[in-house]
Image (cartoon, rainbow, N blue to C red):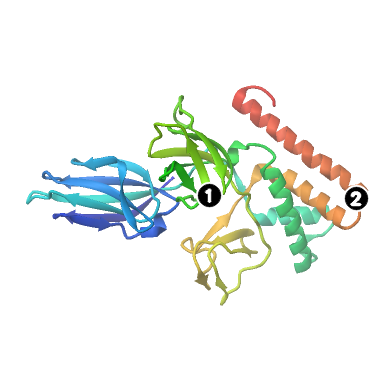
Amino acid sequence: MSVAIQETLGPITADGSYAFSEGGGMVGHSYAIGFAGVFGGATATIEYEWEGSWYPYSDGAYTAADQDLMPALGALRVTVTNATAATNLSVHGTRIETTRAVSYRELPFKRVLHGVANLLGIDATSGRLTTAHAEALNTYINDAMRRAWRFAAWRELQELEWLTVRPGNLIPWSAGLTRQMGDIWRVSKRDPLRSDWAEEVNYRVFGQGILLQGSGLPAQVWVLYTPAAPEFTTVEWETGITYTAGESVYDPTSGNVYQALVDNTSQAVTNAGAWQPVSFPAFLLEPVKMGAFQLALTEEGQASSARLPAADMEDMLQTLWAQEELRNYGRAA
């Protein structure tokens, strides 16, 4: 998915460096840079900022109208040299969101919360679901979600990003990632979703990030991964409260959980510049409900009653995974 940010630099008629105003806000996205106008013998180079210094992208300099795609690591700028009287160059940009390998239908968190409550005999629509009940069920749901999320390499949850390799063949965890990585499935030189031969890159994961191995590595690689499992909450949004970036709130009107993109005070969750929804994948609804139900019964000391829901969750996940293997490879796991 692309987002037109309606930002144009220019007309550029002289040597100099011209920065996109989004600056560090571009981290976590790829950027399509387009050149238009008359170069008139000028040369344009796209550069990115890293730890206070500027570095050119590997595609080199441009001497004619063109467009290129690159990951935004921080601030981007265009540096023009050898401008002449004929130079009248403009540069425009389009932000590219992270690619999801397979899209999935999303559900509001309220449906999960009320579903678990109903299994426990609590009518959530009649006011019987107290704040304390909701907080406890939220803990069980988050535990069950983490288990279901990592049960298998669900293609519906995988995301793909094009990231720049830093000195030392390293992709640090802070390198422009749209979402926190959970499990990494492959690193390749070409887009694995659009190429029959993606050319895999060997790697290992350690504390600082992803360390690529081998020689002849490109300046950018594709990383296919599953983000870390989402965390939900039943703490409702309130006006007058200052929220920090990364903090989550529950909106009972929409039934969704939202995560703050930036520090903000009294910014409604409908403000897309301040909040983003925390999605719940519909295909995991029933297993997570059953898993949360089992945890709730165990907490109440009904361990024997909890055995059936536990088995149901495991069976549901096994069935889902077998169906996915059949769809993808024509065979069951």
Q: Which residue is mark 2?
A: 303
Q: Residues within 10 Å of mark 1 (few under 14, many from 20)?
A: few
Which of marks 1 and 2 precedes in the sequence?
A: 1
Q: Is residue 128 above or below residue 284?
A: below
Q: For residue 104, which numbered disc appears in the image?
A: none
Occupied quadrant, residue 129: bottom right
How busy is the neighbourhood of tag 2: few (under 14 within 10 Å), some, or many (20 plus)? some
Mark seen at residue 208: 1
Most distant residue in the bottom direction: 240
Give the left or right position of residue 92, taking residue 210 as reference: left
Nearest the viewer among 76 and 11 is 76
| Contact? badges 2 and 1 (CB < 8 Å) | no
Question: x, y (%) of residue 317?
Answer: 73, 38
Residue 130 visible in the displayed image: no
Q: Secondary structure at mark 2?
A: helix
Query: Can you say which quadrant of the picture contains the C terminus?
Result: top right
Which residue is located at x 83 percent, y 44 percent?
A: 309
Marks 2 and 1: which is nearer the front?
Answer: 1
Amino acid type of disc 1?
Answer: Gln
> Which residue is more in the foreground, 15 or 245?
15
Side (left or right) of 308 relative to 40: right
Q: Nearer the viewer, residue 46 or 32?
A: 46
Residue at point 44%, 41% (across, down): 169
